[in-house]
Amino acid sequence: MRVYISGGITGIPNYQERFKNAETMLYNKGHYPVNPCNVDAVMPPDSTWEDYVEVDLAILRRCEAIYMLYGWEKSKGARREIAQAVEMGIPIYLSAFDVPVLKEGEENVGENEIQS
């Protein structure tokens, strides 16, 4: 299943690691994670916040579920993404806690919200 990862980016110092950790967890459960950080990294330097959101929402529309990182509700963009997911009627999975960044080879304990 294609699962879009959503969460706070603006003002979050370790957002890339948080998204990467969720991407790894979803992949290990047999899903195809869609990490918007990978796409946003190739946006033109003069892109506005609205440009990023527009691209991210277009990508979300191609997914079959959304995975909301802990603290997503503090993010204006993530709130728009979850509203889009609700409108689409796709499953919404919520991270129950802030997942620490893992070292290579470590496994995340407790991420049981989304199954393979």
Image (cartoon, rainbow, N blue to C red):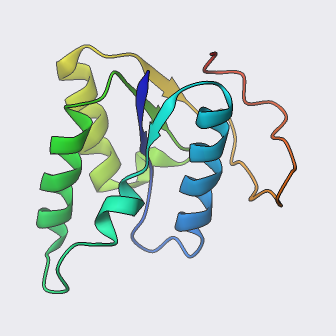
Q: Residue at x 64, y 21 (%)?
A: 113
- The single residue placed furthest to the bottom in the displayed view is 45
Quadrant location of the N terminus in the rendered image: top left
Image position of 43 with respect to 93: above or below:
below
Of the pair 44 and 113, the residue shown nearer to us: 44
Q: Is residue 88 left or right of residue 66?
A: left
Residue at screen point 56% across, 45% down = 23
Give coordinates of residue 89: x percent, y percent. Answer: 25, 13
Q: Looking at the image, which residue is at 82% across and 58% down?
A: 104
Query: Camera-side residue: 85 or 21?
Result: 21
| 57 on left or right of 34 | left
Name the image quarter holding residue 61: top left
Q: How many marks?
A: 0
Task: Say above or below: 63 vs 11.
Answer: above
Residues 6 and 4: in front is: 4
Q: Is the residue 37 above or below the residue 1 in the image?
A: below
Q: Position of residue 76 (x, y in %)?
A: 29, 54
Which quarter of the rendering shows the C terminus?
A: top right
Residue 17: percent from left, percent from top:
62, 64
Residue shown at 45%/74% (left/top)? 11
Name the residue nearer the viewer: 24 or 53.
24
Spot occupied by residue 91 in the image (x, y as percentages of width and height) = 39, 16
User: Compared to 94, does 68 lie above or below?
Assistant: below
Horizontal side, residue 7 vs residue 81: left or right:
right
Q: Which of the 4 image quarters holds residue 28? A: top right
